[in-house]
Amino acid sequence: MKFSFVWSSCFYFSPDTTSNSTRQGAKVAPNVIGAFSYEELKQATSGFRFSNKIGEGGFGSVYKMERVVAIKVLSEESRQGDREFMSEINSTSNFSHENLVQLHGGCIGQGGSRILVYEYMENNSLAQAFWKSRTEICLGIARGLAHIHEEIRPHVVHRDIKASNILLDQNFNPKISDFGLSKLFPQNITYISTRVAGTLGYLAPEYAISGHLTRKSDVYSFGVLLLEIVSGRTAVDFDPQLGEYYLVEKAWKMYEEEKLIELVDPMLKGKFSEAEAVRFIKVGLLCVQQFRRLRPVMSMAIKMLSGEVNLDDQVDITQPGVITDIRNVKLCQSLTSAKEQ
């Protein structure tokens, strides 16, 4: 069974729809995304049966249906309310790219339950799969971020780039998913002051402290993810001797000691290009530098990763910034915008 579009049974989503209008529907051009009936989605998942569940997070559960689509059912108790629901729709309906997960449609069902319908990714998330080609995965993620940061209008900042939000298709091609926290950046706006959201270990320090969100906030998160992919470690790790430590700090220490090659995942058993691995780690460190103006934009990061830019000759790496204490994170910020000073 595959899904058909049932335009009359639900509603369309508009980029400027507010949380109040999500409960009532909105009139929009029919080419934005599809609309599905609640009963159609319920039937396709056999009543949201547990055996069809392929993932679960803080926002809700994800179900599959015969490798055709993935159905994300947002929990009524989750932190993802109407604002985040509409952010995900507004962002994902605005682009189409091979390294971005495709949103097919959605539905508000019984009791106001919120459901999103995505393309199905056979190999689940980066966090749960052993990848065949780490370099291609890193480049694919970078291309997806460059697309939303630089190529589409308005620009989009994801706000929660991490391993579990990178999905892999049957060929292990990466696609960025979960745009529930994303923000649209109107033209000529450098930063947006907003509440801090994301995952500790991936948060850019200036964003975590001030609430000033920029595209460089995503670049920082990408840098952490890049270090994770190459090293096989998590952003916040534990060592029996060191205790809890942050991967960014460990990578910087090994850079200073000129031991970057020792950071590479031992599971690779030496079957990798040392020069390429060191280059990828250096790009990761460039992306997590303390001062955001020093971090590369994503299009430049792609050139660095692919070897078009010689890092040894043209780039200086400075100390990274890192948030190690949740008490330093600014949890609430007014929703205003301004230009960077």
Image (cartoon, rainbow, N blue to C red):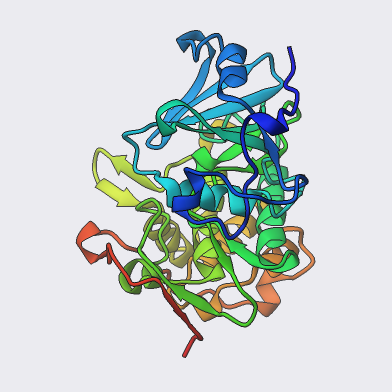
Which residue is pictured at 24% across the width and 57% down the height? Answer: 326
- On screen, residue 318 above or below 301: below
Residue 44 visible in image:
yes
- Name the residue nearer the viewer: 273 or 125: 125
Please state the total of marks drawn on the protein image. Answer: 0
Which residue is pictured at 26% across the width and 46% down the height? Answer: 244
Q: Position of residue 302 (x, y in %)?
A: 72, 61
> Which residue is most to the left?
327
Q: Position of residue 73 (x, y in %)?
A: 48, 29
Q: Quadrant of the N terminus?
A: top right
Q: Quadrant of residue 4?
A: top right
Q: Position of residue 164 (x, y in %)?
A: 50, 38
Which residue is pictured at 53% across the width and 41% down the height? Answer: 165
> Which residue is most to the bottom?
341
Side of 337 where 97 appears, left or right: right
Side of 203 where 191 appears, left or right: right
Side of 244 where 164 appears, left or right: right
Q: Position of residue 36 (x, y in %)?
A: 64, 29
Which residue is pictured at 43% across the width and 74% down the height? Answer: 290
Residue 269 visible in image:
no
- On screen, residue 21 above or below 133: below
